[in-house]
Image (spheres, coloured by chain):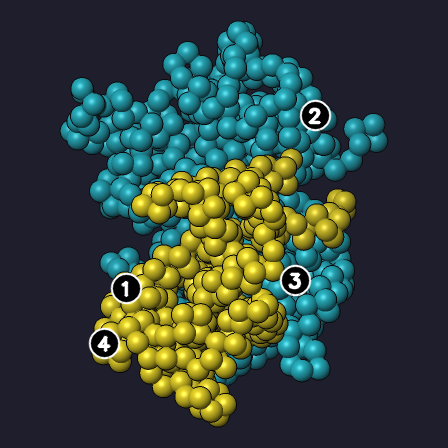
Chain colours: A cyan, B yellow
Amino acid sequence: MDSPSALDPPAEAAGPSAPLLVECVGLRKTFGGVVALNDADFNAIAGEVHALVGENGAGKSTLIKAIGGRIRPDAGTIRIKGQAQALGAPEDGHALGIRTVFQELTLLGGMTVAENLLIGREPRGRLGFIHRRRMGEEAEALLARMGIEHIDPLALVEETSLAERQIVEIVRAINNRPDILLLDEPTSSLVEREVNWLYGQIEELRKRDTCIIFTSHRWHEIRNVADRITVFRAGRHVGTFEDIDESEAITLMTGKRVSTLYPAVPPLPARDAALEAKGLRGGRLNGVDLTLHKGEILGVGGLAGHGHRELFFSLFGAERTSGGEILVGGKPVRLASPRQATRRGIDIALVPEDRKTEGLFLGMSIRNNMTLSVLGRISSAGVLNFGAERRVAEEMARRLGVRMQGLRHPVGSLSGGNQQKVLIGRWLLMEPRILLLYDITRGVDVATKHELYELVSRLAGQGHSILLYSSDAEELAHLPHRVLVMREGRIARELAGPDMTAESIVSAAVRDTAQS
Amino acid sequence: MPQPKRKAAWIRLVEQNAGLVLSAVLLVIAIVLYCAIYYAAQGRLPGGFELTTTVNNTMPLVFAGAAQAIVVITGGIDLSVGGVIDLTNALAALYLGDSPLSMVLCTIGVIAVGGACGLLNGLLVAYGRLQPILVTLATLAIFQGLAIRVLPAPGGSVPEAYTAILANFEAPYSLVFIVVLLVVWALVRRTSIGVGIYAIGNDDLAAKSSGVKNLRSRVTAYVLSGMLAAVAGLFLVANATSGDPTTGNGYTLRSIVAVVLGGISLFGGRGTPISAVIGAFVSTMIVNILFFAQIDPLYQSFFEGVFLVVAVLLTAIISRLMRRRAVA
């Protein structure tokens, strides 16, 4: 234990009474020069839900991968059901009754949901060949048994949404009746209702004496389902607790005190409209009206598939609209492409949720990634000025507090939160007046979340106008000035002041306004 | 949770087999065009003789295309298809005897040699973790060299009975072999290996975490490819009635053309070898059209290239439109 004594950690949980199902002793794993696990211990028992918390890069995912057999630790012992195991491949884990739902989904996009669900255990006909029709029926029955009716088993996985894929992945893991179920950020792409579905499934598994180990960055979720909570920091086990509150946990995770997660909302200057949408239509959008003021943080919430993605991409010119108007600074503009949206005088920037596919070039350096938006400005006569490039990137990295080994290192070597900062940095270099932030804290650890919140709040204070979508209702309740809740392609409700709570946002998203 | 309307079965079928549907449409267009040009040139519509020669001329490419398609679906590419055809073509011309027993044994032997060539590719790619394009580029040269060693100059002979079976001049009996190919593929698709071939083409790592036997699936794909290329070599030798150790060279690129015309993604994991069969016929029809349009043979490859670009563009545009509709 290396937690500073001045921080008085809460009392650690007593040793478990049931026999240990998973026992890790002195695990060590390095990737290149980075130590992911450093003499890490961990244990879990049958019938418990065990949360693993820590910052990104604390070693949670590495531990999960080691237990699941996806990676082999450099040193240390893993005992499963009392037996020391050398797990070198996922099959080894499967054979011991271990199933994992990975953070980076492992579904096969060009194959159907049914094929993915039943891979390796397909129903066979009389001659031993896979029976395709029965496979569809079995998948349908399996989904129905677990209360999922909205996913078509014969759809290709690539046709389904991120949340649906996550659900399919979870269903597949549970269907294999594991003794040990590992969930690495299972809720990062799920909305409230689907998260509740997952709680229900976890409850069922707990009754069957399954050991469930999961990681999450959403504290209320951890509080709701976990029996025990283990905190990791810098590849080490810091402590395991039955009861610990959020600020204590954050203190242990970061090694420093964080008073509150959400910064104070900056005061709103004069109500000048920066960005307006009037009757915006197209795709899922069904007449959206909104006004974003100068210096305002305007939250957008709602269930997945109700049009926020289309709204953000339309406002960025990345999605075509079929009707309505967009006004910037009171003047109507036509945004047919992101190029037009980022043009001087309009100055709109979008930070997307899926930074890996929609923004960053993971193999390229932090510097190159950051300065991509301003290459023109740091070139003379078409030739890139490397000195200017480095200065610009250095300054932005410092301003955003990017934790890195150096600007030359590839973005892929950074933790998720820091990758997100690089992407935000790229757009900030353009000095945009309007920032569209689309679920930027998804899958980001709590300490980095805190930093991102402070950044957003600071940017608004400096006069940037921010439209912020989040799948986390808590975040929407605390960070913005106002929140718009979308349903069926339109703004269903506007919440402000004391009405702006996570509960009211969720209920406005699911229920008809007349009833709420 | 909300239950959105499900798509009608036939719409889903069309959407999920867009490549197959598009290649079929392409084939219909090519046939109509061919008939029109033939009519303009000859004053009558093409008949049974034209059908038979077209089928017989296309059979080698049908199997070469299917061979290529299986490897492409795993996310790889097989440049050695032409080399395997050279080698098997030469072997068949040398060893085929007149007795039925000799023909059966020789056929089996030649297909086994094709399988062995594929096995070599597969082992190098799967266990050696080498790039398919490099491995098969090297083995292409090796197989071509072996072919020359086996049959230094064009020659050898093919028993008439053998030609009558594989490339009958009376009627397009060889269509039966396409049916056999389709049935065999439908069965392979319904095995763990068949699932594995698609799975590794989609995402190697994800396939592994799903418990797929990656190495075995990949090696099997290359073996199947080698065997199908050997069959292509047999059809070629039967059609020509004698052997030529360099006649297969063009088939590497032509097999890729058949795959592309079949709308199979070169990124892997999607599509079916059936559409490569259709792609093979489209490719033959293009040559036929050029012939009857009385294009100077010197410019033939120029126009073939132009047709190919137009066809590929058309396929890309239509599938993009379909995707946009599917999203909306």
In this rendered view, identify the residue nearer to me: B217 or A418: B217
Image depth: mark 4 or mark 1 in front: 4
What's the amino acid at mark 1?
A: Leu
**Residues at discs 2 and 4 both on one chain:** no
Mark 4 and 1 residues: CB-CB less than 8 Å, in contact?
no
Q: Which class describes the residues within 10 Å of circle 1: few (<14), some (14-19), or many (20+)? A: some
Residue B137: assigned label: 1
Mark 2 sits on what residue?
Answer: A286
Q: Secondary structure at mark 1?
A: helix
Image depth: mark 3 or mark 2 in front: 3
Q: Secondary structure at mark 3?
A: helix
Mark 1–mark 2 distance (CA, rounded to whole Å): 54 Å
Image depth: mark 1 or mark 3 in front: 1
Q: Earlier in the sequence, mark 3 or mark 2?
A: 3
Question: Which residue: 72% across, 26% down?
Answer: A492
Residue B152: assigned label: 4
**Quadrant in which the C terminus of chain A appears:** top right
Q: Earlier in the sequence, mark 4 or mark 1?
A: 1
**Residues at discs 1 and 3 both on one chain:** no
